[in-house]
Image: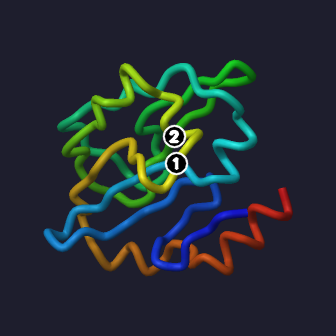
Amino acid sequence: MNIPANLKYTKSHEWIRLEEDGTITVGITDPAQEMLGDLVFVGDVKVGEVLSAGETAGVVESVKAASDIYAPVSGEVTEFNGELDAAPESLNGAPYANWIFKMKPANVEDLAKLLDAAAYQAVATAG
């Protein structure tokens, strides 16, 4: 199970990376893409939308299931990875190299409430 130590995580299987400009980059974890199977669609992310932590930010669909993607913290969606329109399966091959959306957090200190790699591994293996 691949869980990089330099990222933050949610119990709902999103990974989060804080960027130098104060934005965050969000994707799905390796265990999440494994559970979902071959992805066929990633989207419904609305740039400019202001979300509260835990609100639905978009959706991923696979041959097996559809699953919501959640905002890890409150803030504004600033970008969607348009490359996923043509190649949603890239998340299966490299879930940490391919992101889904970016946000400007309302309060960057909220990131401290997210899981570190060890805490996420406990969540991922319990499920």
Q: Quadrant of the C terminus?
A: bottom right
Q: What's the image's color scheme?
A: rainbow
- Of residues 40 and 105, the one drawn nearer to the viewer in this rendering: 40
Q: Residue at x 51, y 72 (%)?
A: 114
* Quadrant housing residue 117: bottom right
Q: Residue at x 52, y 49 (%)?
A: 95
Distance in Å between CA atoms under marks 2 and 1 = 5 Å
Labelled disc at residue 94: 1
For mark 2, what is the residue? 91
Q: Residue at x 36, y 22 (%)?
A: 85
Are the residues flagged by discs 2 and 1 in contact, CB closer than 8 Å?
A: yes
Amino acid type indicated by mark 2: Leu
How many marks overall?
A: 2
Q: Residue furthest front?
A: 93
Q: Position of residue 84 (x, y in %)?
A: 38, 29
Q: Quadrant of the N terminus?
A: bottom right
Q: Residue at x 68, y 77 (%)?
A: 119
Amino acid type indicated by mark 1: Ala
